[in-house]
């Protein structure tokens, strides 16, 4: 058997229920295409995120206002340090939570990116709900990190693969871990907890329309039919385990901080086909790392 049975799965037939549109209307087939069709933000749709395909924009209903969400592409077009604040001609749209005064970016780092002072690497970022994620896999070289097939060209594309202890930056698998746990991530970022991955999957599941959660998180480079609506841009980086390297361009695997003390296994999340699932596996396997902002 390839892996143990999934304990959590998200998708159109997920534990949370079938995928559905985030906007309700007297016409069940109605789906807003532009901001003018969006309607009011009120208590009935508070917290909902809507993607408007004709505008190619995302909005979040919060505090009675539709707030335009900022993507990594928009951030990178700003000349300021930190997030670019988006504005709209409509008076009920504002986004003061990610302004040009934000301390999110490290000093002198190009807007829209996370800059790792340890080795000078630069990573795209994306905002998904209330979370800020790296939009690329970590590629910080250290002991017990691997390039797929030991080829540097794959690290440049897919990032490095890390054993769990290495990803956690601990010396013994029984060492104490308290969330948020920085692990191997750059300063100001940390290894996602099980709950943070769950929240990511839950948010995407509720806001991705008819598309499966895993497919919604895939990059267009991996799956040409994916619209990568949330900018997570996952790639099929595969893994390293006891028989060598496997599943490149087929599956993606990401470590979380959670562990099961009863059997010595640790939690990871995986994208396989169109699903995004949680499972447990041996600490010696090497998977990708996606850091999340503190």
Image (cartoon, rainbow, N blue to C red):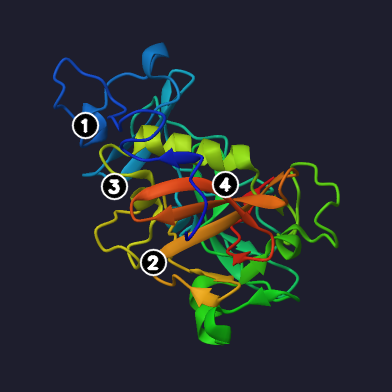
Return the residue nearer the eye: 89 or 38.
38
Is residue 133 shown left or right of residue 115?
left
Q: On the image, which quarter does residue 118 sit in?
A: bottom right
Q: Residue at x 56, y 43 (%)?
A: 197
Q: Secondary structure at mark 2?
A: loop
Work out whether residue 79 can be spotted.
no
Q: Any mark on residue 32, and which?
A: 1
> 180 and 88: which one is in front?
180
Q: Quadrant of residue 169?
A: bottom right
- Please give the name of the residue rendered at 75% of the width and 53% of the height, measured from the top-left corner: 182
Q: Which residue is mark 4?
A: 132
Whether residue 151 is situated above or below residue 29 in the rendered picture: below
Of marks 2 and 4, the one in the foreground:
2
The tag earlier along the polypeptide, 2 or 4, is 4
When asked about the image quadrant of residue 26, the answer is top left
Say whether disc 1 or disc 2 marks the residue closer to the N-terminus: 1
């Amino acid at each position: 058997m390839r892996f143990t049975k999934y304990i959590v799965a998200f998708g159109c037939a997920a534990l949370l229920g079938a995928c559905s549109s985030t906007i309700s209307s007297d016409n069940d087939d109605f789906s807003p295409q532009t901001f003018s069709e969006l309607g009011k933000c009120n208590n009935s749709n508070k917290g909902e995120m809507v993607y408007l395909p004709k505008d190619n924009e995302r909005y979040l209903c919060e505090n009675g206002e539709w707030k335009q969400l900022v993507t990594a592409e928009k951030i990178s077009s700003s000349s300021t340090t930190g997030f670019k604040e988006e504005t709209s001609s409509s008076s009920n749209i504002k986004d003061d939570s990610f302004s040009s005064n934000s301390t999110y970016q490290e000093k002198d780092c190009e807007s829209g990116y996370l800059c790792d002072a340890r080795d000078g690497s630069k990573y795209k970022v994306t905002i998904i709900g209330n979370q800020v994620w790296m939009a690329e896999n970590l590629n910080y070289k250290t002991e017990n990190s691997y390039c797929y097939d030991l080829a540097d060209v794959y690290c440049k594309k897919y990032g490095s693969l890390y054993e769990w202890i290495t990803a956690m930056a601990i010396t013994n698998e029984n060492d104490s871990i308290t969330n948020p746990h920085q692990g191997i991530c750059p300063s100001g970022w940390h290894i996602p907890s099980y709950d943070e991955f769950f929240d990511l999957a839950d948010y995407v599941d509720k806001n991705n329309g008819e598309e499966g959660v895993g497919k919604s998180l895939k990059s267009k480079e991996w799956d040409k039919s994916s619209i990568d609506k949330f900018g997570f841009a996952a790639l099929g980086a595969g893994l390293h385990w006891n028989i060598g390297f496997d599943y490149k361009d087929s599956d993606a695997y990401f470590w979380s901080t959670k562990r099961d003390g009863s059997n010595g296994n640790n939690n990871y999340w995986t994208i396989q086909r169109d699903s995004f699932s949680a499972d447990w596996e041996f600490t010696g396997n090497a998977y990708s790392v996606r850091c999340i902002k503190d």
